[in-house]
Image (cartoon, rainbow, N blue to C red):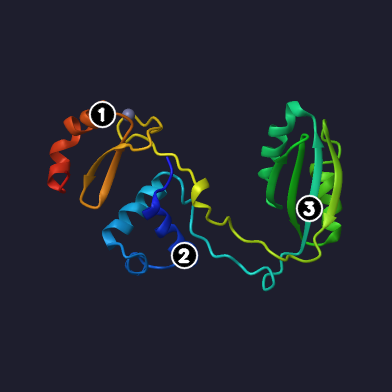
């Protein structure tokens, strides 16, 4: 399921100011506050919004030495290696790329830290060879993902059976400003049968 035009408007407002209140977002997007709150709740539940964090300026925060490492990995173990490396505190980004390569961005205290990082985590790991390691000399751009509405996807799970909703337009029940989503008519009906009386109290339609 993809966010629609309304979701995208809300996301854009939030990407510009992640601390904007529901009221402020509503004002900026010409939507109502309940709509903003319901849409955000849905996008958060669907896992589209992971978390709200401050974006630190690379210039003002001393992150020590940053390095880009490229590894060549045997195909059978590439994903496992990438996942293991992703768990390390020093590792900020992990990319699997074509040709069974893994590229990492690591943050270390100093240049010496790079050598010990390599020794500790990479050299001698079976099926893995370090093909290049470069120290970053200047960060020109390092921003969170930008919003490409056409490419956004989010998973929505059925509120009754919890299976993923694959329909473009899921079946819904609105209760006040909150929406419930269902994969099929049957689940929607089953949900109403089970919880209908409770929903009626909070104004379902
Ligand atoms: Zn279902």
* Side of 70 relative to 16 (left or right): right
SS at mark 3 in the image: strand
Q: CA distance from mark 1 to mark 2?
A: 36 Å
Does mark 3 have its CB less than 8 Å from ligand 1?
A: no
Q: Give the x, y percent position of residue 45.
A: 39, 46
Circle nearer the N terminus (1, 2): 2
**Residue on which disc 2 sits:** 18
Q: Select label 1 or label 3 by which is in front.
A: 1
Q: Disc 1 designates what residue?
A: 185
Q: Residues within 10 Å of mark 2 (few under 14, many from 20)?
A: some
Q: Is residue 172 left or right of residue 114?
A: left
- Front residue of 165/89: it is 165
Q: Tell me, for residue 68, which label it has, or none.
A: 3
Task: Say left or right for 17 vs 65.
Answer: left
**What residue sits 22% from the left and 28% below the top?**
190
Q: Say what secondary structure mark 1 lies in.
A: helix
Q: Secondary structure at mark 2?
A: loop
Q: Position of residue 121 (x, y in %)?
A: 79, 43
Q: Residue at x 19, y 35 (%)?
A: 195
Q: Residue at x 82, y 37 (%)?
A: 72
- Choose the circle earlier in sequence order: 1 or 3: 3
Q: Is tag 3's residue or tag 2's residue first in the polypeptide sequence?
A: 2
Residue 77 versus residue 203: which sits nearer the camera? 203
- For ligand 1, the image quadrant comes to top left
Q: Residue drawn 41% across and 49% down?
A: 44
Q: CA distance from mark 1 to mark 3?
A: 50 Å
């Amino acid at each position: 399921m993809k966010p629609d035009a309304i979701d995208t408007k809300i996301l854009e407002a939030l990407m510009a100011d992640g601390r904007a209140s529901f009221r402020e977002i509503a004002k900026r997007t010409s939507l109502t506050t309940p709509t903003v709150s319901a849409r955000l709740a849905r996008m958060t539940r669907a896992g589209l919004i992971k978390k709200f964090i401050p974006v630190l300026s690379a210039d003002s925060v001393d992150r020590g030495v940053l390095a880009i490492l490229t590894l060549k990995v045997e195909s059978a173990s590439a994903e496992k290696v990438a996942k293991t490396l992703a768990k390390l505190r020093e590792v900020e980004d992990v990319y699997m790329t074509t040709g069974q390569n893994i590229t990492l961005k690591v943050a270390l205290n100093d240049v010496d830290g790079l050598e010990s990082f390599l020794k500790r985590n990479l050299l001698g790991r079976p099926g893995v060879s370090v093909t290049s390691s470069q120290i970053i000399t200047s960060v020109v751009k390092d921003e969170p993902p930008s919003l490409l509405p056409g490419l956004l996807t989010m998973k929505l799970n059925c509120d009754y059976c919890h299976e993923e909703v694959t329909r473009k337009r899921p079946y819904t029940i609105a209760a006040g400003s909150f929406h419930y989503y269902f994969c099929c008519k049957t689940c929607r009906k089953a949900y109403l049968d089970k919880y209908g009386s409770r929903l009626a109290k909070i104004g379902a339609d």
